Image: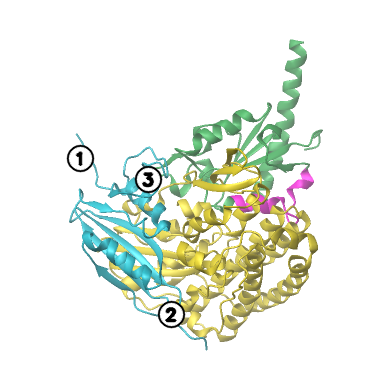
Amino acid sequence: MANIKRSPWLLHYDGSSCNGCDIEVLAALTPVYDAERLGVVNTGDPMQADIFLITGGINEQNKEVVKQIYDQMPRPKVVVAVGVCACTGGVFKDCYNILGGADTVIPVDIYVPGCAARPQAIIDGVVQAVGLFQQRLDEHHAQMKKEA
Amino acid sequence: MAEVICPENILEEIEVSDLLRRALELKKAGFRFSQAHAVFASKENKYEISYSFSDYNTYQLHSLRLVIDLDTVVPSITEIIPAAVFYENEMKELFGVKIEMISADLENKLYRIEVETPFGPKKEEA
Amino acid sequence: MGKRSVIPYGPQHPVLPEPVHIDLVIEDERVIEAIPSIGFIHRGLESLVDKRDFNQMTYIAERTCGICSFQHGMGYCEAVEHIMGVEVPDRAKFLRTLWAETSRMHSHLLWLGLLADGFGFENLFYQCWRVREKVLDIQEMTAGGRLIFSVNKIGGVLKDVTDDQFKFILKTMDEVEAELKVIQGTFFEDYSVLSRLKGVGVLTAEQINALGAVGPFARASGVNVDMRKLGYAAYPHIDFEPITSNDGDCYARCYVRLMEIYQSIDIIRQVIAKMPAESDLSVAVKGNPDGEYFMRVEQPRGEAFYYVKGNGTPNLERMRIRTPTFANIPGLCEMLKNTELADIGLLILTIDPCISCTER
């Protein structure tokens, strides 16, 4: 965390979660837990987002949506799977319409367990995501310099 | 102590041909359409369809029950009760109940699932 | 007459915490028709009855929705208890009522916050959520979880609440009431809030009746319907009257939900005052459910419907959950007609949509 130079923006998308984790993601951003003190800002636009928080498993209909949102985000980007459903499918993994966790369609970097994931756990996930984002940004810049 | 209204639920078994008439009568009597659902009874190999109506004032729940064979065609009640459209599309998509004349037939595209009729009769494996 | 065009709205949209897709047919800025399409969160959890037994299904039912989680579990358990003829101990009934009302409080506070966010009043959004955390603290302390706390079981509840905890709850209720009085002024009197809410999206009682709407959405149009009057859990021992309003607009919906928080505070005080002495919290349940039952409970969003059919084996034949939002979607589509495009986000919020439970 010490070498954070940027303020990454968060995008939240509800896969097929039960709402519990979504509400906890929002609660983590509100004053009591205040994830925004870590320099992140919640946004609704994928094109401006750097960190993708996804809750809930992947089903037949939303897999294209999730893929599209992931592709719309500029590089470098970090994906955080929040809650056990986004990690593995959770209690719903035997349902006919659930394909599995978020990693069935997009690469996931950080897994936050919990049902529903607690705000403290989500903040920890965001902290790690901010660090990873900075690291990827540095690598990206080094690559750009080499190519130039 | 608050007044408690606790009417017994009414369950009325009817024939397919009576469905529209009974639905209209209940609507005229001031009942609101509450829900509809299907059950696939695996033992009898039949569908059980329930249409529940509820009264805003007396809280009475009145359900109409159809017990039909798998290939019986059921008329849609959406002409009488427009709010039934999602319930009927759901039955059609998830159970494979044959319902005709739905006012907005989504052609099995309500949930857009890959599995065909997941709640319906199990397909015999070849 | 202007040119007609179709605007797709959602599934990923800043004002919606959950994905729902609506095709809006608009003429200039005016909405002519709204065609919803759902299914982004369809999991098919009702099909799990084949793989899980009826006791395990309690936990599945609780995960239908993360906000009204407790009430989903309670509705399912009450339905199975009716089939099996189980009489739940009185203390368990009162505890269920207590948790049901804290769920309602935090759900309504959450909604008030989202509404404030919907009309761009971020400060008010944060204030509502700050107060909501106090209610969540009660749930965490008494049941061990913030949102999904799995204290229901068939035959009773799993956890008891001690006298010290009751004292804490009463103290918190006083705090929440005082804070709510401050927030209430902004919702009911602030000029800019009123200009967004008054007279927007009006539905009459006749329309509500025809479209089968439920819950605060129906009560805001003057329809006096509250399933708590059916007398499940400990509600027969509680004195309360449903809160209604006659305006049928967004302001009325806001009014009904805000006043229901006060009502819940009152009910919780009654529950604690009338709490039966310590006893067993659950009764042993023998055998498997055989038979069917239609159960209705009043969730924060309205009437939820549970149909359970057992066939004498541990696996149920069918569990069906009809959630309040499913019943309110026809009302929403009617309400969206003839409104301004800029109001759409706010109007969708005022039915308090819970898409996760709608699609199950």
Name the residue tied to disc 3.
Answer: B105
**What chain is the green one?**
A
Q: In the image, which residues are magenta?
A: A22-38
Name the subunit of mark 3.
B
Dominant secondary structure, magenta: helix
Q: Residue A23: within the magenta?
A: yes
Q: Where is residue B84 in the image (x, y as percent from the top left)?
A: 39, 57
Alpha-carbon span between mark 3 and mark 1:
28 Å
Front: mark 3 or 1: 3
Q: Which amino acid does label 3 sit on?
A: Asp
Residue in the foreground of this view, choosing between A147 and A4: A147
Name the residue tied to disc 1.
Answer: B124
> Mark 3 or mark 1, which has the lower sequence index?
3
Q: Please identify which colour was used for chain B in the image.
A: cyan
**Which residue is drawn at the image coordinates 69% and 47% (left, top)?**
A123
Front: mark 2 or 3: 3
Q: How many marks?
A: 3
